[in-house]
Amino acid sequence: MASIIGAGLVKVSNHWNMSIEDLAYEAAEQAMKDINSERIDAIIVANAFSGVANGQENLAAHIASSLGMARKPSFKVELEGASGGAALLAACSMLSRYERILIVGVEKLSDVTSLEDITSVVSSSINREHEGILGATIYSHHALMMREYMRRYKLEERDFGYFPIMMHENAVNVPHAQLRFKVSMEDYIESPYVSTPLKLMDVPSEADGAAAIVISRSDGPVKVSGIGFSGNEAVITHRIDQLDMENITAAFSSAMREAGIDIKDLDFVQIHDTSSVLAYLQIESLGLSDKGKAPKDTESGKFRRDGEIPINPEGGMKARGYPVGASGVYQLAESYMQLQGTADGYQVQGAKNCAVVSLGGLASSCVVAVLRR
Amino acid sequence: MRPDRQVGIVGWGVYVPMYRIRSEELARAWGRDWKRHAAGIMVEEKSVPGIDEDTFTIAYEAASNAIRRARIDPSKINAVYVGTESKPYAVKPTSTILAEALGIGGQKRATTGADFEFACKAGTEAMQAVIGLVGSNMIDYGLVVGADTAQGAPGDALEYTASSGGAAFVIGPAEESVAIIKASCSYVTDTPDFWRRQHERYPAHTRAFTGEPAYFHHIIGAARMLMEEIGTKPEDYDYAVFHQPNGKFPLRVGQRLGFPPEKIKPGLITPYIGNTYSGSSLIGLSAILDIASPGQRILVVSFGSGAGSDAFHIEVTDKVEEVRDLAPKVMDYVNRKKYVDYTIYARNRRMITLLKDFSGY
């Protein structure tokens, strides 16, 4: 059984004056503040774009060195947005060999200075040969899914506003969140298109950040009770149904089965909301809403922090911010704080159990972790 | 910094080309909805130079107005410095054309002359140099110009703001001044927020990086440095002029320094004509001199990418009212306008490349 025994995170922002190593160092130091670094046996770095965005590969070795742990085994896990979830799976699987493992998630996108370059970097998760070459971007893919979702369930653009409005509301008092302000439906409707009908307010803004957790073989305050991993056809045009997120359902079921709890036992869920439509598809795939009903349920307040089943109490990728490869580790660090009752500004009262969904690409990879107090 | 001999502004003048293009029209050309896309920057329209206007012609008009208000013979001026990032020649000074055209330095052309480059603060940097020359008694009068026909790449966010215009000042002894420059300071760091390399037509910039670590950091740094040095507070000033790359930043930086909008808005001209780069903060200062009363105090802080800020503490004298009407005011130029569409804009800005250039170039 794996436990989380420490967590740290850096404010999601444009950290102009910090390097990718500086960010990783700060989060790791926080996570290890009560743990002697000599007792850490291995380091896993979760990151998506250090090669293309920072010109830095061999990243784990550099981060381990800057932490004074050059002699410990270290490597990087890359699975785009799911890098953090995949790092957790790797760490838990390695506990038979190492007693304590540090996971550091880090992403620094502000080193990329032009808008064209940033779109190219974040779109490197789609297939270059089959999709990128035709001019597709990660945003145009989200837009295609949104269009199909609207058509299938007869929805309007405003139906997609409910989710970002809720995320911004949740993030207002979160100290480490990137966008700590409320937005209205009017703001949403007036926000410019990124790729019609996808709006600027449907997607996160690029950011820098780092989060870290320490995983232990022995008993700790927060237990990793279940992990599920399931993939999907990575090229979306190869999928029979564009809105098929069955793999999320599969990963979630297997994690819940391993944890031995029921969906009713969950006190909150963290999802990977890199667009409003992807958020809705996850909500439905997790069984929290019927197909096509996630917008209505979101509007009703069911998923608010004080609702029936809170989703992303910290503001999600949309408002807490989306440091891509680090995002999964942020979720785990935040959930750790939630279950400890120290999530100041975003605490779900009395939270005992939660599920964390970490996605890579357009759900081509899905890692679900169930954490329990 | 304070010179040995007190110096001030003896005359001021501006010039803004008469053509305007609406931001809405710029957005239309690129298939964008202006309200959704860029209304937040608070620039409704910007000035566009005529096909035969450039930084020199703008500088000439502004300097002529400044000399009219200074009521001195141009032959008594012994320094002419033009601050710009859109020189008509890459190598050949604009200042020498200006000296010749205005008769500066008399028959002997006994004048120093140079072009200054420091992105949007080249004009105030030139002012610092002339304060030094007059303040050390090397010369009695010097001419400072900040003027630009700023470049914004077609379709780039800069296209909404990069505009044309300029301001000129005759700097001389405090006794003859309409406004005394009591103190100044400058602050620079190596900050690559915006640049244009040799032979490139349009500048590059680093998106959000141009805000916090560039504009705000340097303006706040220089303003606080000056106020600390001379022991003043925001309440001691009647007006504040900050570099105005758009309509939003000056109000926001003012708020952070403790200047209410009513002290900033009289000198906030960018919403009507765009960002005239080297002319920007100096046109703002001119707009204040157009209306200020004797005894009033003005804080001026420029910003130039690359990056740095110059801050000036200026006190208006009773001479201001005697000369105010001797030349057109900022608002006269703002209100003198003729709208053009994107086609004419593209032609006037020479964005359309012809196989053979029929314009005479």
Image (tube, coloured by chain):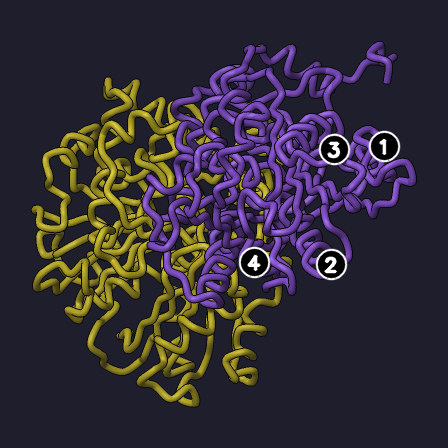
Tell me which chain appears purple: B
Report, in whole angstroms, how far the alpha carbon at label 1 lies from the one at label 3.
28 Å
For disc 4, the marked residue is B184
Q: State which tag comes first along the sequence, 2 or 4.
A: 2
Q: State which tag comes first along the sequence, 3 or 2.
A: 2
Q: Nearer the viewer, residue B95 or A361?
A: B95
Q: Chain of mark 1?
A: B
User: Residue placed at 17% from the left, 67% from the top?
Assistant: A339
Report, in whole angstroms, how far the alpha carbon at label 4 lies from the one at label 1.
30 Å
Q: Nearer the viewer, residue A246 or A357?
A: A357
**Image position of B136 (left or right of A30):** right
Report, in whole angstroms, how far the alpha carbon at label 3 lies from the one at label 2.
41 Å
For disc 2, the marked residue is B137
For disc 1, the marked residue is B100
Marks 3 and 2: CB-CB under 8 Å? Answer: no
- Percent across and percent down for residue B119 are 66, 44
The C terminus of chain A sits in image quarter: bottom left
